């Protein structure tokens, strides 16, 4: 599966647009991590637990989007974007979305 943020893929022509595909996950913060993050915030620097949580969320959302594209028979997903949304105090959604397409070689 080819994944791109652009509208097209060099050397390939879009044969068919299959539609929008998406994948999301909702994650809640951990109270203990919040306490340690608050301490880290006082001293400054990266909050590695949150960095790890966001990276895992992004990968899970991508995996779910790719699974949806595979089910449609896509060769690639173009125009990939990410967005986040606060769901409630301490929980956020991470959404990945794009356009599933089939490809053919460019002439």
Image (spheres, grey):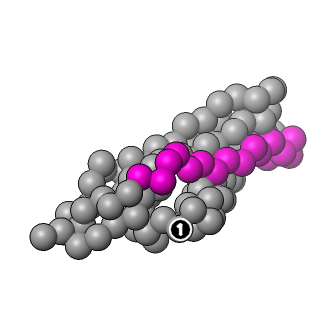
Is residue 73 found left or right of 40 in the rendered image?
Answer: left
In-front residue for pair 48/84:
84
Could you tell me residue 51's position as x and y percent? 60, 51
Could you tell me residue 78's position as x and y percent? 39, 53
In-front residue for pair 4/35:
4
Q: Residue at x 57, y 62 (%)?
A: 72
Q: Residues within 10 Å of mark 1 (few under 14, many from 20)?
A: few
Q: Residue at x 12, y 70 (%)?
A: 107
Q: Is 80 contained in the magenta span?
A: no
The part of the image, by quadrant, that contains residue 39 is top right
The part of the image, by quadrant, that contains residue 66 is bottom right
The magenta stretch is: 17-34
Could you tell me residue 82's position as x and y percent? 51, 43
Q: How many marks?
A: 1
Q: Which residue is mark 1?
A: 73
Is residue 18 found left or right of 43 in the rendered image?
Answer: left
Q: Residue at x 39, y 47 (%)?
A: 79
Q: Main secondary structure of the magenta part?
A: strand
Q: Is 31 contained in the magenta span?
A: yes
Is residue 41 found left or right of 91 in the rendered image?
Answer: left
In-front residue for pair 17/76:
17
Vertical comparison of 97 with 88: above or below? below
> Mark 1 falls on what kind of element?
loop
Could you tell me residue 64's position as x and y percent? 65, 59
Vertical comparison of 7 with 1: above or below? above
The part of the image, by quadrant, that contains residue 4 is bottom left
Residue 93 seen in this snapshot:
yes
């Amino acid at each position: 599966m080819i994944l791109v943020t652009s509208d097209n893929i060099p050397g390939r022509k879009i044969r068919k647009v299959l539609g929008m595909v998406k994948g999301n996950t909702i994650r809640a913060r951990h109270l203990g991590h919040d306490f340690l993050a608050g301490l880290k915030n006082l001293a400054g620097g990266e909050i590695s637990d949150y960095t790890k949580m966001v990276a895992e969320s992004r990968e899970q959302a991508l995996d779910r989007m790719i699974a949806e594209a595979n089910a449609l028979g896509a060769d690639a997903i173009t125009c990939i974007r990410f967005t986040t949304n606060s769901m409630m105090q301490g929980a956020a959604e991470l959404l990945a979305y794009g356009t599933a397409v089939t490809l053919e070689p460019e002439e």
